[in-house]
Image (cartoon, rainbow, N blue to C red):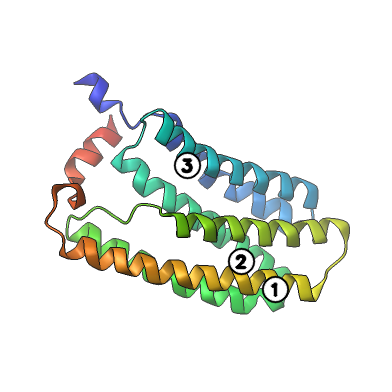
Amino acid sequence: MPKEKSKNLNIPNALSVLRILLIIPFMICYLRDYMTAAVVVLILSGISDALDGFVARHFNQRTQLGQMLDPISDKLTQAAVAVSLAIRHPVLLPFLLVFIFKEGIMLAAGGILLRRRKRPCAARWYGKVATVLFYITFVSILLMDLLSVYYDVPVLVLLTVTCVMMVFALVMYAREFFRILKSTAPEDQLDLDEVMDKHRT
């Protein structure tokens, strides 16, 4: 049915793709010292992240493709920001290592679920909180760069709180991963062929 096949062509999925595309201008602007432009791009990325979930929930535009695109765009954006800031501020390297560890495990877990034809873990509140803290921390650092000031103690406090929340989110997602892995419920199964057919159309 044409209507069913075009289900993936919706606003939330478009916003997720936009978030991925914004990575390139952010890195170019930040690493070339166009701080105002970098902050604006990152704020737009954060707004798109909040909007895609809101639109998907309130306008019934949730799709299996969207459930995969949303976390992928989040992680790619966070990785680009973390790497860019760590290049300028070596004190951020420990945070970057925590981020890489967490996302590496979650990426591997997602791959395992896909191979088992299981639906990847959907975004949960703890993951969203970790993402919000991430944006607060790094937008704060970007603003400090923009104003040519840098405060070690506030930055370290923000980084510590964000790291704790990231570890907590990893533990909670691990519980969800093992639940889905063992589940035989229809809602935890993933029809990859159907997803790809809809995506191609």
1 or 2: mark nearer the eye: 1
Q: Amino acid at mark 1?
A: Val
3 or 2: mark nearer the eye: 3
Instruction: Find residue 83 and name its label.
Output: 2
Query: At 31% from the left edge and 68% from the top edge, which residue is drawn?
Result: 175
Dot 3: what SS?
helix
Find disc 1 in the rendering and name its residue.
157
- In the rendered image, the quadrant that contains the N terminus is top left
Q: Amino acid at mark 2?
A: Val
Q: Amino acid at mark 3?
A: Ser
Label 2 neighbourhood size at 10 Å, few (<14), some (14-19), many (20+)? some
Q: How far across and how far down the image is residue 93, in percent?
A: 63, 77
Q: CA distance from mark 1 to mark 2?
A: 19 Å
Residue 103 visible in the snapshot: no
Residue 141 visible in the snapshot: yes
- The reply, left or right, for residue 77 in relation to residue 170 is right
Write down the quadrant of residue 83 in the picture: bottom right
Query: At 51% from the left edge and 47% from the top edge, which residue is drawn?
Result: 20
Hey, which residue is sitting farthest right in the picture? Answer: 148
- The reply, left or right, for residue 31 in relation to residue 24 is right
Find disc 3 in the rendering and name its residue.
16
